Image (cartoon, rainbow, N blue to C red):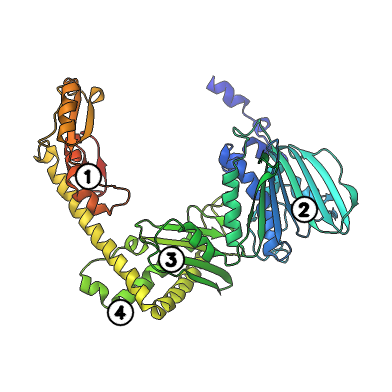
Amino acid sequence: MAEIEEENYSASNIQVLEGLEAVRKRPAMYIGDISEKGLHHLVYEVVDNSIDEALAGFATHVEVTINEDNSITVVDNGRGIPVDMHEKEHKSALEVVLTVLHAGGKFDKGSYKVSGGLHGVGVSCVNALSTYLRAEVNRDGKHYVQEYSCGKPTTELRVEGESTHTGTSITFLPDASIFTVTVYDYSTLANRLRDLAFLNAGITLTLTDRRVTDAEGKHRSEVFHSENGLEEFVRYIDSNKTELIPHVIHLTTERQGIPVEVALTYNTDFSENVYSFVNNINTIEGGTHLTGFRRGLTQTLKKYADDNKILEKAKVEVAGDDFRQGLTAVVSVKVLEPQFEGQTKTKLGNQEVMASVSQAVSEALGNYLEEHPKEARTIVDKIVLAAQARQAAYNARNKILRKTPLMGGGLPGKLADCSSRTAENCEIFLVEGDSAGGTAKQGRDRQFQAILPLRGKILNVQKAVEHRVFDNQEIQTMFRALRVSIGTEEDSKAVNLSKL
């Protein structure tokens, strides 16, 4: 059989996908996946084009509407996509943008200084993956319209009356034969538009859901607008947290031709909350701009602590993570030619951005620390506390490791164990107090049900510092009863469930 296949394997087996066929054949390569994430990515591609118009200084409003049939309409008041004839392709520029891969205005450095679109595949992918797309362009005093299906024009470009304004409107219905999910989630789109409003101070974005009406017959709608940009973004993220310092350290500058905007503050929590963006695209995997931010933050805070001999007095070794406990920050850079890993753009690769962001953060944070000594000391004290807690947690884990049954610690005295030694069949009931333990023992099946009384409610581990968790007597009792150990030679935080 293999020989027959080998003999028949010839040039005729090599397929060349024309036009947008490749997008329909392998959509995940272009939009990430074909479920909820990819479905919403279609909207982002169209909205990003409108935002690029705003970044270029030609648009101030972007309106997104979820229609009753789960189609989407995106309208902006930019210049409008060009409709004149394209010399090379012999069709209108609008049709070229919507039907030809790697066609767009982002390759010409004169058209857009910075943009989220790079490869010229965004809106043509949306067209390819939609059973219906209607493009409306207002420019040169006329209203132009053209319709498409699955990436192919179904009508000629036509003029439908005159227009007194400029802008572009794109309405599209995702192809249900490609997407596993075709219902848009309002909150997912609202979060994205809110981010864009914070990232582009002064631009107004509107989201309307025509599927939902209130008692007065009005559609659900929200307007997103920010005057102070990232400073408001950080305050929004930290709205439910207790602030450690009253200020948001906000810098807007340009380094080596790269506009850099960063806002950061500290709260009393122990987690790190950092969001990074490149040309308004959320780089969820980070990249060189995030590395530069962390480097600038760490070096500046460590220098301040060393200069004031704070670490020397505390007698503690500080690690990189300690500097970021309780940190909330947003990093946004605008790069002329960003190098992303893949079309879905989740990680930035430009090396020159690292130094630009690091220098900008170091200078702004250094100035803040000098001008606000009280807040500076509060931040450094939290860093020292984080380092001490990390060391204490390491010691506490080692203590639990020594107390496991394998290390001779035995089972806790109040555990009423069961007879069976087949873990899959056994149950353990954690009860509050000895009296509850006595009652539970009377009603249990001794063969497979074990009872472990605990003294009162245990620690709220979500809010507690890590070393307090491992030091807690009741939690140690649970670990020993369950035969769970913490920490290995390779990883001090590893949880070993092999003897559960």
Q: Can the viewer see residue 20 in this picture? A: no
Up-down relation of residue 456 to residue 86 (above or below): above
Residue under the point 19% across and 27% down: 440
Q: Which residue is mark 3?
A: 265
Residue 486, label in figure: 1
Which of pointers 2 and 3 indicates the residue nearer the eye?
A: 3
Q: Residues within 10 Å of mark 4 (few under 14, many from 20)?
A: few
The earlier-in-sequence mark between 3 and 4 is 3
The earlier-in-sequence mark between 2 and 3 is 2
Residue 168, label in figure: 2
Tags 3 and 1 touching, CB below 8 Å = no
Q: Amino acid at mark 2?
A: Thr
160 on left or right of 109: right
Q: Residues within 10 Å of mark 3 (few under 14, many from 20)?
A: many
Q: Which residue is mark 4?
A: 307
Number of marks in the rendered image: 4
Q: Residues within 10 Å of mark 1 (few under 14, many from 20)?
A: many
Q: Amino acid at mark 3?
A: Thr
Q: Amino acid at mark 4?
A: Asp
User: CA gap, disc 2 to disc 3?
Assistant: 39 Å
Viewport quadrant of the N terminus? top right
Percent across and percent down for residue 13 are: 65, 30
Secondary structure beneath label 3 = strand
Please tell me in which quadrant of the rendered image residue 302 appears.
Answer: bottom left
User: CA gap, disc 3 to disc 4?
Assistant: 22 Å
User: CA gap, disc 3 to disc 1?
Assistant: 33 Å
Percent across and percent down for residue 101 are: 70, 47
